[in-house]
Structure formats: C-alpha cells, structure tokens
Amino acid sequence: MTDYFEGVVSALMRSASEGRLGRIRRGIEKEGLRVDAEGRISQQPHQRELGSKLTHPHITTDYSESLLEYVTPVFPHPSDALDFLADLHRITYRYIGDEVVWPASMPARLNGNDSVPIADFGSSNSGRMKHVYRRGLDVRYGRIMQSIAGIHYNVSFPDTLWQVLADAEGQSDVNARDYRSEKYFRVIRNFRRHGWLLMYLFGASPAIDKSFLDGRSVEGFEAVGKSTLLASDASSLRMSDLGYQNKVQDQLKVRFDTLNHYVETLRSAVSTPWPAYQQAGTEVDGEWRQLSDTILQIENEYYSDIRPKRVVRHHQTPTQALEAEGVEYIEVRCLDINPLLPLGIDEQQTRFIDTFLLYCLLDSGDVISDEEEQRIVENRRRVVTNGLDPQLTLASVNGEVALADAAEDLFRALKPVAEVLDASEPESPHADALNVLAQRVRDPSLTPAGQIAYALASEQRDFIDWTLAKARQHAAWFAESPIDPARDTCLEELAEQSWQQQQALEQDTSVPFDEYVRRYFACAEKHATPR
C-alpha cells in the first residue's frame, strides 16, 4: 500500500468512527426478458397495466418490447434498493399472466433476428426518437445482441466523504465540482484496471442456447443437452466478443484521463460519419432506419464497463450535463444477472461493489498508457472467456501473474476500505462480504458461472430448461411475500400518471419529427456552460 492510500484511509476511518462520513448512495437498474411457458421470448406487447414505457420512472423496457427494465430510486441502504426491486417484480407478475421474467443475462429461446420485437414508445417525437434509435441498433448490430440483459449499478459518494478526502489531500479550496469529477475519473480508471475481479466473482453466463447464434458457428464450446453450448471455463459470455461487441466503437479510443477529453471523444463520435452506416442511410423510402450515419447515433450508444453520469435536464445531452455540472455518479455496467438469485443480485454483492468502488477512489490512479490499455483489454478478455481455469494468468507490468494471486492481493487491499465502511454500520457487512467472496478466488466452482456450468454439465440439462425452472422458482418466491402496500398504491398511481404524461406528449404535434431530430442534433453540438 502507498503512503497516500494509508493516509486517506486513516482520515476516512477517523470521520467514520465519529459518524461524520455519510453513506454511499446507490440505485439499481435490472433488465429481464419476458418469456412464455416454453422459454421463448415473448411476442406480446408490454402490459398496459404496468404503465407507459416512455414516461414511467421505474418500469420501462430497454431495446425490446419484451425486455423489461426496472429502475429503483437512489437509496443509502442496499436493502432498501433491493426491496424496491423485488416489489417491481411483484407488480409485474400481477399482470403478465403465464409469462415469467427470464433470470439470466443470455437470452431465452429465439427464432431469428425478427423474433426480438423492437420497443414501441408511441407517436410523440420523443417516443419515435427512442424507437428509431433502436431501429438503428438493429441496422448496426442486429436485434439478437440487444436481447442480452444485465444489471447496472449506479453509485455516488456522500458530500461529507468528499470534504474529508479533500481536506486529507490539502485541496479544500479547489472547485468542488471539478474536484469530484477528477476523482470520479480516477475511480473509472482504477475500475478498468481491476474490474476483471468483478467479472470473475460475479460472472454468471457460461452458456447459451444455440438459437442465440442464429446459424453462426463458434468454436470452444461443449454441446450439452439438445440445444445448449457450454463454455465451462467462461465467467461471462455476456461480456465477451460473443455478447456486447462493437468493432466500430473500438476506433474511438476513449480514454478516461479527464472529463473534457471524455466529452470531446463522445461528441466527435456523434458527429463523425462511418462509411457502412452512410451506406445504410438514415431515411430510406420515407422511413427512418437510424437517427444518423455517424459512429454513434447518440452518446448513450457507447458501450463501456463503467461510465460517468449526471442526471440530464431538459434539452441536454449526457455530455452537456457532465460539462455543465460535472460528474454526479458512476454507472457500473459489467454485471451479469445471477439466475441463482431471485433478484439477480443480493446485498452481499452490493456491499462488495461499494467497497471495491471506494477502493478505486482511494488508490492512486495515473492516466492509463497505451501499453497498460492493451493489458487491460487482454485481461478482461481472458477472464470473461477463461476465468474459471485455475491456471489462468493475467498480464501485468512485471509479466504474467496468476489470477488467484492478483485477486488475493486485491482482497488484502480492500480489507481496510471495508473496515472504513463498517465503522458506520452496527455490524460488519462489508468485511463479511469480503470473507465469503474470498473463498471463490481459489475455488472457481463457487462462482455463479462455476455453479451454473456444473449444473448444466453434470445433469446434461439444456440452458433453456434449467433457467426456465429457476424463473418459476423465483416467481414463486415473489408470490410468497406480499408487495409493500404503500409502494403498491404508489406504483399503481404512477402507471396511470405515466399514460397521462405520454398522452400529453403525443398531443403536441407542433414540430414535425424530422425537424425535432434536426433540432436535437443542432443542440447536441453546442458546448454547455459550467454552472
């Protein structure tokens, strides 16, 4: 450990012991396909009783009409976020009949690209823009890739923590907005250095149904059951080249050294045409195929394991919001849905992630060089495809190092950070999470991917059948405990209000859609003025 790390940890521990540190705040976004009784992706529309996909704050859809997306509010206690997420599932099951929510990241049984219905957000300009954006994703990557689901974990550190950290660094007089943005980018850089650990510990997608390939052939898989391909050493096929991938975006070379560089890179990608997308066209025979022919249609198209975020105000793009007011929180995007858990995530995992992110803030984090970037990309590739191989090594500045050794080094570094967080708790949930999860380091069979691979291989059971059985178990689990009455009333009211909000948007026909899109991109080109 460096002198800097020990110094800031000591400063935070003093504040935490005195009850002055505050609490990390987090919100959870979870996706999940609706599937029928045979494990096939649903072709039914999003149930009206769940509210408008366009305007409901907590229940919407992601790419597909069948791909539910749950969004919790921000909570200072992980259990509250998880309880809210559970109730979103419960109210969903009230209205989806015989369907279930698919509890895995890799999709249910598909029947070609067109079996993934694109979400329809209504006739308003904002709704049409969301739909056309998704049509563009189909043109660029195909719908099947967009049927993959995951969990996004959004985290912000408390104001009091920032003040203690700035005091410890002798930077109390610097601009608070700029200071936080700088430190959040340090979190992102260190996360990218060490994020392979999360993919190893929590990866839960070692298998696919053959229908996911849509006729393509792949190597390195074991045939299981009638229609399953298993990569027994893989931790997360979702995060591999088989899952989310974009060779065009590789051209961006996004570096997380400063906020300005990050913003300028994304802004350039939204304004730089790409030949293949130009050839596909935007409007063809009077129909929109994509919003633009540039590398990114909009900034949110950029794929990354982690992103800096800020709540976007009206008529702002994400980068304009960041420019104007700095980074507000970070979004972790590399988490698989764990089909062994009803919610796909549990409190133990949230406690570990919180500890990990605070470590990424407190550790020194220089700018990532080209050479280190290559190691980061290579280590990520190795872990997601071969992470369960006990002999796996990672690339380091000093040569190859065993994954287990590197993981144990990180666990040792995480221990004092967990103690800081536990100083504000009646017990020791962060240290307890480290102790339990450390057992996975030397025993890959304890990881979610290891447990799933063993279950499928030992029983010679198809991924679809096994996951569908888990979905039914989870549905029964949700049914065993009732929804919180106050939250039930609130969600029912929000559903109705969301339809009223969508109707109001659709009644405004003063701006034609073509002009609406033109104005959006004209506005997106402008630099925001810092507040």
Image (spheres, helix red, strand yellow):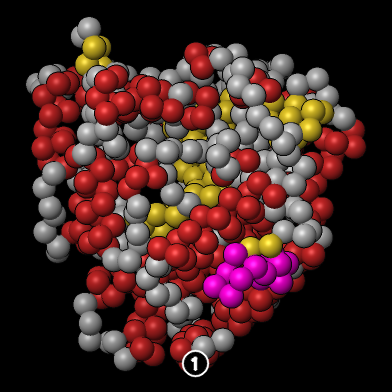
Compare residues 508 and 464 and report the one nearer the observer. Answer: 464
Asked which quadrant contains residue 274, the reply is top left
The answer to whether residue 186 is left or right of residue 419 is left
Q: Residue furthest right?
A: 458
Q: Is residue 500 above or below residue 250?
A: above
Residue found 69% across the figure and 62% down from its top: 393
Q: Is residue 129 above or below residue 306?
A: above
Asked which quadrant contains residue 516, the reply is top left
Q: Is residue 402 magenta?
A: yes
Amino acid type assigned to the residue bearing label 1 in the image: Asp
Q: State the image coordinates of residue 162 (x, y, percent, origin top left).
A: 37, 78
The answer to whether residue 448 is left or right of residue 279 is right
Q: Which residues are the magenta region?
A: 395-407
Give neighbour class at mark 1: few <14, some 14-19, many 20+ (Cα, 10 Å). Answer: few
Asked which quadrant contains residue 379, the reply is bottom right
Q: State the image coordinates of residue 386 (x, y, percent, origin top left).
A: 70, 50
Q: State the image coordinates of residue 363 (x, y, percent, origin top left).
A: 48, 78
Q: State the image coordinates of residue 121 (x, y, percent, origin top left).
A: 35, 23
**Quadrant of the frame with the N terminus:** bottom right
Residue found 82% across the figure and 53% down from its top: 445
Tell me the residue that label 1 is attached to: 3
SS at mark 1 in the image: helix
